[in-house]
Image (cartoon, helix red, strand yellow):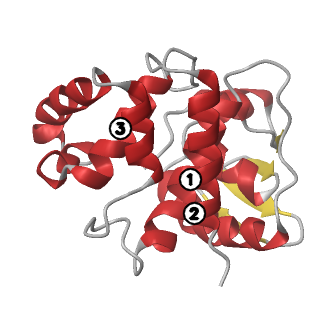
């Protein structure tokens, strides 16, 4: 079975070391050090990881993340590269399910913050795996969007979603759709076809899970 989560983790940690702690990411306000600290918190601090999804715990989670980010950067990246076997999200049973998309997205968060980037030529299997994640993401994040939306990944599938209204088509490779649907519209290479105002609203909508 392909281990895409492991491959994306290794590629990301290689890039984090190559760029250093203060390189930009596309996550507003975060440098590479901040992104690495986020990943360490998610895998190694179950007491704080709930703050990634539960608003009442976000303040505590952010304080923990800032303390992690203040530590030695090589040690921080080493912790990202080698997750603990006991982590609920990174053990051998959960790693591919919990981390394939997580590490793909954050790898691109760093890659696409630089200049001269281009989409990678990804394995067909990885694109297929990303489409399996993009489909439920689209149904969740776009279900209330005021348009008749068609999301298409040529060669992989398509779906319709939205509250209804004017037709709007979103076309791209699964990897690009995952980035778009996770709130990274400005760096996602997708094609939007529809009324200009609906296109503008979708490009600037607050997406993500």
Q: Is residue 116 left or right of residue 7?
A: right
- Secondary structure of the residue carrying tag 3 is helix
The residue positioned 34% from the left and 65% from the top of the image is: 89
Residue 38: numbered disc: 3
Label 2 vs label 3: CA separation?
18 Å
C-alpha span from label 1 to label 2:
5 Å
In the foreground, 43 or 152: 43
Give residue 66's quadrant in the image: top left
Count of marks overlaid on the render:
3
* Residue density around tag 2, few if under 14, some if 14–19, many if 20 or more, within 10 Å: some
**Is 77 left, or right, of 131 in this rendering?**
left
Disc nearest the viewer among 2 and 3: 2
Which residue is the site of mark 2? 6
Residue 84 is left or right of residue 11, and the answer is left
Q: Residue at the spot x=77%, y=74% of the render?
A: 125
Q: CA distance from mark 3 to mark 1?
A: 14 Å
Dot 2 and dot 3 residues touching (CB under 8 Å): no
> Could you tell me if the residues under marks 1 and 2 are in contact, i.e. CB atoms within 8 Å?
yes
């Amino acid at each position: 079975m392909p281990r895409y989560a492991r491959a994306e983790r290794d590629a990301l940690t290689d890039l984090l070391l190559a760029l250093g702690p203060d390189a930009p990411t596309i996550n507003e306000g975060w440098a590479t050090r901040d992104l690495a600290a986020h990943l360490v918190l998610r895998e190694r601090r179950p007491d704080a990881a709930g703050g990634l999804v539960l608003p009442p715990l976000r303040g505590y989670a952010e304080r923990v993340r800032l303390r992690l980010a203040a530590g030695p950067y090589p040690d921080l990246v080493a912790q990202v590269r080698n997750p603990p076997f006991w982590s609920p999200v990174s053990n051998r049973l959960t790693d591919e399910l919990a981390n394939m998309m997580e590490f793909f997205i954050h790898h691109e968060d760093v890659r696409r913050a630089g200049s001269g980037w281009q989409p990678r030529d990804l394995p067909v299997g990885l694109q297929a795996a990303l489409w399996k994640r993009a489909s439920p993401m689209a149904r969740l994040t776009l279900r209330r969007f005021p348009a008749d939306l068609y999301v298409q990944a040529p060669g992989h599938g398509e779906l319709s979603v939205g509250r209804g209204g004017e037709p709007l088509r979103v076309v791209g490779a699964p990897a690009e759709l995952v980035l778009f649907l996770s709130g990274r519209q400005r760096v996602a290479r997708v094609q939007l076809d529809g009324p200009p105002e609906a296109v503008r609203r979708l490009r600037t909508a607050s997406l993500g899970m």
